Amino acid sequence: MSERLIGRSADLKRLRDEGYEVEVRHGFLVVHSVPYVNAQKQVVLGTIVTDLTLNNDKTDKPADHQVWFAGDHPCNSDGTTITQIKHTTSTTTLCDGVIVQHRFSCKPQIGYPDYHAKITRYIEIIQNQAKAVDPKADARTFKPISSSDEDSVFLYTDSASSRAGIANVTRRTAMAKLAIIGLGGSGGYVLDFVAKTNVREIHLFDGDVFLQHNAFRAPSAVSLQELDVRPKKVDYFARLYGQMRRGIFTHPDYVTEENVENLAGFDFAFICVDKPAVRKLLSEYLTKAVSVRPPAPP
């Protein structure tokens, strides 16, 4: 994902081609080895991080002018704090492996046209003071960065979570297997929410055909041509959400006493059926399955 996004985005590719150590991680642009002066007037290296605004899996104009910084607060060559960019200080985990300590603000009148302009402006402010101490200080190291292509369930980057600052929280939804039993007026909307989380496998259980009345109780919109095909509900929803993610599995049968054991081994199950007898069957089986499951390792 990182290499593909950088290759498709002219501003990120330009940063990399100019020798900056850039990678994309969970919707954040991470720029390593930025030289800065600390309070002891030493030149050390920090990291600049910004969330990415994406469109069709390539960068769009940055939504804001701020960045995060990992390291001590950069100083002038005499060891005094650079107040020009100072904003807030708070240790924050943005996503796995990206922990920052500061938020900087440097806002041009018309904003930044792209991420090359945004990143190089902050580097200029910080690095110029480092160069005053060590003329060889340069963030353009041309150091190769190993690919950080993410083992993601999504076909394109989840930039909404990074933009909202909740990427580290959303990673907690990455359970292994989840079942949705019933894809009617409730189950379809459960899937709509769950499909946008990091669950590795989503299993759909429903024996019904997707008919005209279902179209008015389901998320999204269904074309007349799709209704004419009379697809199974599980197949319709798998195709719909398969456009944005991997890991959707279909089970085009009703769950009965004969096959209820197919629900064994799931981390979570949503019961979205309207028949009381079936709800009772599912609830009793799943409760029993949970009670015999071995405890999770500490």
Image (cartoon, rainbow, N blue to C red):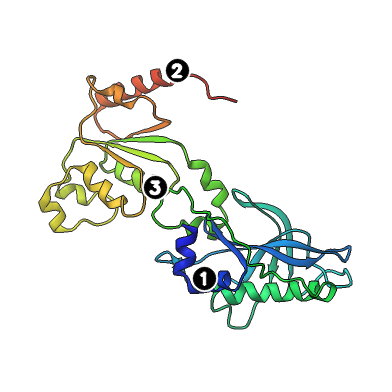
Q: Where is residue 187 in the image (x, y as percent from the top left)?
A: 31, 41
User: Is 165 left, or right, of 185 in this rendering?
Assistant: right
**In this rendering, which labeled residue sits more in front, label 3 or label 1?**
1
Q: Residue at x 24, y 29 (%)?
A: 275
Q: Position of residue 285 (x, y in %)?
A: 34, 20
Asked if labels 2 and 3 touch by Cβ distance under 8 angstroms, the answer is no
Q: Mark 1 points at which residue?
A: 13
Q: Where is residue 84 in the image (x, y as percent from the top left)?
A: 76, 75
Sort mark 3 into few (<14), some (14-19) or many (20+) by Cα contacts within 10 Å: few
Q: Mark 3 points at which residue?
A: 193
The residues tagged by marks 3 and 1 sit, at their Cα atoms, a distance apart of: 33 Å
Q: Which residue is drawn at 37% across and 23% down?
A: 286
In the rendering, which numbered label is found on residue 291? 2
Q: What element carries label 1?
A: helix
Asked if labels 1 and 3 touch by Cβ distance under 8 angstroms, the answer is no
Residue farthest to the bottom? Answer: 109
Q: Which residue is drawn at 48% across and 41% down?
A: 174
User: Is 81 left, or right, of 197 in this rendering?
Assistant: right
The residues tagged by marks 3 and 2 sit, at their Cα atoms, a distance apart of: 27 Å
